[in-house]
Each structure stands twice: as structure tokens, then as C-alpha cells.
Amino acid sequence: GQQVMQIPQYQHVQEGEDFTTYCNSSTTLSNIQWYKQRPGGHPVFLIQLVKSGEVKKQKRLTFQFGEAKKNSSLHITATQTTDVGTYFCAGHTRGDDKIIFGKGTRLHILP
Amino acid sequence: NAGVTQTPKFQVLKTGQSMTLQCAQDMNHEYMSWYRQDPGMGLRLIHYSVGAGITDQGEVPNGYNVSRSTTEDFPLRLLSAAPSQTSVYFCASRHTGTSTDTQYFGPGTRLTVL
């Protein structure tokens, strides 16, 4: 079945440093979504990427979708303490209604 | 709009007990789903539904039943609770057939099975 792998599992960065998490799918995706979950909270939708090679930006966050639509990345520039949380990618395969999540990357910010 | 609501927020069960986790949404979303979240395991799909009267299994369906009699509600039933079902359960909903599949999550139910 469809699998979505995400690395790294944990990341500690100094405030102001950049952060990147990577997502890889075992199958070609029709779209990929990114979510953020604050400690003790629920996942919150950030963005969806649909097109091959697509790049989207939200302020300090840059999201990329690979040309083969099997991998994606989230890059945060100049991290802030408000970026603390777990970032999940979630893949949606064409013809399948399921949305499968990666295990997430937990980001810790050191002041 | 209340969005996606879940009840209860916390629940403690004894092994073998049954219970129903409630989920409701007021956004007229066709698609609803249940996930469980365990440390280091991310979010795993239990069951999902693409509309009233239609349900299907996700990644980890064993030990759980669902039904979808209305668009708004998607309850999750634990038939005979086991300690392995201790987890945080999230319900989610979204539209289908649109260009933006934004999925909204409820606040979660934290379940402990003793």
C-alpha cells in the first residue's frame, strides 16, 4: 500500500537558523499537503501542492513538490520560537480517497 | 461555524469495554476520516467516508467500526477496548472534488485503556 516517509524525525535548531524536512512517497501522488501541529494541539493545514515541480511560499516557509510527484520538502528560513511543533506531510493518490500521513518532523528551537 | 467537533475530550476505559467517539462537522463536507496518533507513529488512518452511507477502511481499521448515516456525523466505535488502543484520536473532514482539499481536524479525544 501507499507509504509516506518523512525525515528527519527530530530537528533541533538555534533560533534564526534554517530548517528543512523531506517527504518521500512510495507511489506517485496527485497532490501533497503539509500540516503543522503545535504541542498538545491538532494538525492544522498549511498548504497543498498539486503540480509537478511546484514551489509555493508562505512568508518564511517554502514548499516544493518534486518533478516526479513522489517527493516534497518544507523549508523554513530564519526559524522563530513560534515555529515549534511537528510538521507533517500527507499524500493523496489519484483514484484513491485516502490521505496518508508521514510520521512527521518535530522541530525544537533553541533560544 | 463550529468546524469539526469531537466528544469526549478525555476518556478512560477498562479492557473489554465498548464506547463511541463522536465527531460532527457543520461545513457540509463530503469526506470525513478518523486518525489515531501515537508517539513516533504520526497519524494513521483508521476509517474514512466519502459521503453518507459510504465507509471504507484505512491503514489500521481492526477493532474499530464506523457508520455514516448523515453528512454531519461520523462516529467511531470501539467494540472491545484493548490497551493497544490507547491513543489520541482525531476526526477530520474536507470537501471532495474541488481543487483545494483542505482537511480540517477536530481537537481530538485522548483515550486511555487500562
Image (spheres, grey):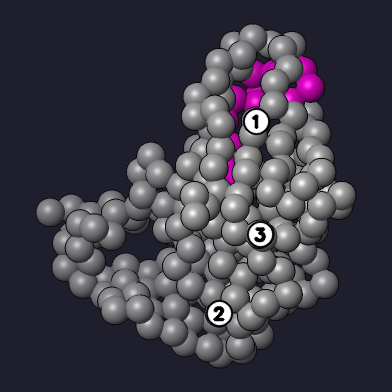
| Residue drawn at point x = 29 percent, y = 54 percent | A84
**Which residue carries the number 2 mark?**
A49
Secondary structure under the numbered disc 3 in the rendered image = loop
Q: Label 3 to label 1, Cα distance in Å?
A: 20 Å
The label nearer to you, 3 versus 1, is: 3
Q: Looking at the image, which residue is at 64% across and 18% down?
A: B83
Percent position of residue A25, x then y: 65, 68
Direction right: furthest residue: B53
Q: Quote the CA–CA distance across marks 3 and 2.
A: 24 Å
Tell me residue B46's x, y (percent): 72, 43
Of badges 3 and 2, nearer the viewer stands 3
For disc 1, the marked residue is: B21
Residue B72 is left or right of residue A80, and the answer is: right
Q: Amino acid at mark 2?
A: Leu
Label 1 chain ID: B
Up-down relation of residue A73 to residue B65 (above or below): below
Q: Mark 3 — on which chain does it sit?
A: B
Amino acid carrying label 3: it is: Asn
Residue B52 visible in this rendered orientation of the protein: yes
Residue matched to label 3: B28
